[in-house]
Image (cartoon, rainbow, N blue to C red):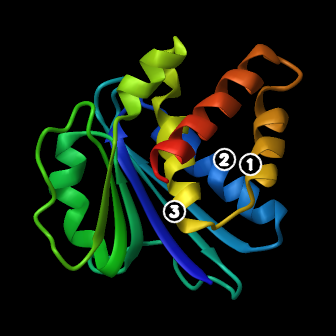
Amino acid sequence: MNEQILIAGFGGQGVLSMGKMLAEAAMAEGHEVSWLPSYGPEMRGGTSNVSVNISDKPIGAPIISPGDATCVMAMNLPSLTKFESFVKPGGLLLVNSSIIDKKATRTDITVYYVKANDLANELGNPKTANMIMLGAYLEKAKVVKPETMLDQLRAVFGAKKPQLVELNENALKKGADSAK
């Protein structure tokens, strides 16, 4: 396995959290992992992206170059515009179609349009859009087991905010269901 995942969006959309949870879950399953965040100085609204590499072999560099990503998750239009070219031929592109009305231009990749924000609103919490997108990715890529991701949710939220475990678990399931 050699997954190179790029997750991008606005600051405040939970992009870095998605990447960190994915990286932690992959580490818990014994994979080699790198997590490299990139963000502007703004607290919210600026650009934000994270590169996550998951492999069964040591990872030489955490940087994902254009044409090398096995998956790009675009949470906003600027991210789709900037990172669509990063997906390698045959790779996966997940687009947050709730706020991106543009279609992907490439025909050599698999594209899924996930209504992440709309589905999050159905759950009653717009902040779960990131977990919905992550759930869709996990359904398509099968990189980590759903149980491992649930364990990660419990580790992150369990003691301090146990009410968020069930909410985020439901968001992951809703995202996975949307990608079936």
* Residue hosting label 1: 149
Q: Is residue 42 left or right of residue 135?
A: left
CB contact under 8 Å: marks 2 and 3: no
* Residue hosting label 2: 21
Question: Looking at the picture, which amino acid does disc 3 mark?
Answer: Lys
Q: At numbered mark 3, what does the secondary structure look like: helix, strand or loop?
A: helix
Rendering quarter of residue 157:
top right
For the residues labelled 3 and 1, the Cα–Cα distance comes to 15 Å
* Residue hosting label 3: 140
Q: At numbered mark 2, what does the secondary structure look like: helix, strand or loop?
A: helix
Tell me how many marks there are: 3
Between tags 2 and 1, which lies in front? Answer: 1
CB contact under 8 Å: marks 2 and 1: yes
Name the residue at 59% across, 31% down. Answer: 171
Q: Residues within 10 Å of mark 1 (few under 14, many from 20)?
A: many
Between tags 2 and 3, which lies in front? Answer: 3
Q: Residues within 10 Å of mark 2 (few under 14, many from 20)?
A: some
Q: Give the mark, 2 or 1, whose residue is nearer the N terminus.
A: 2
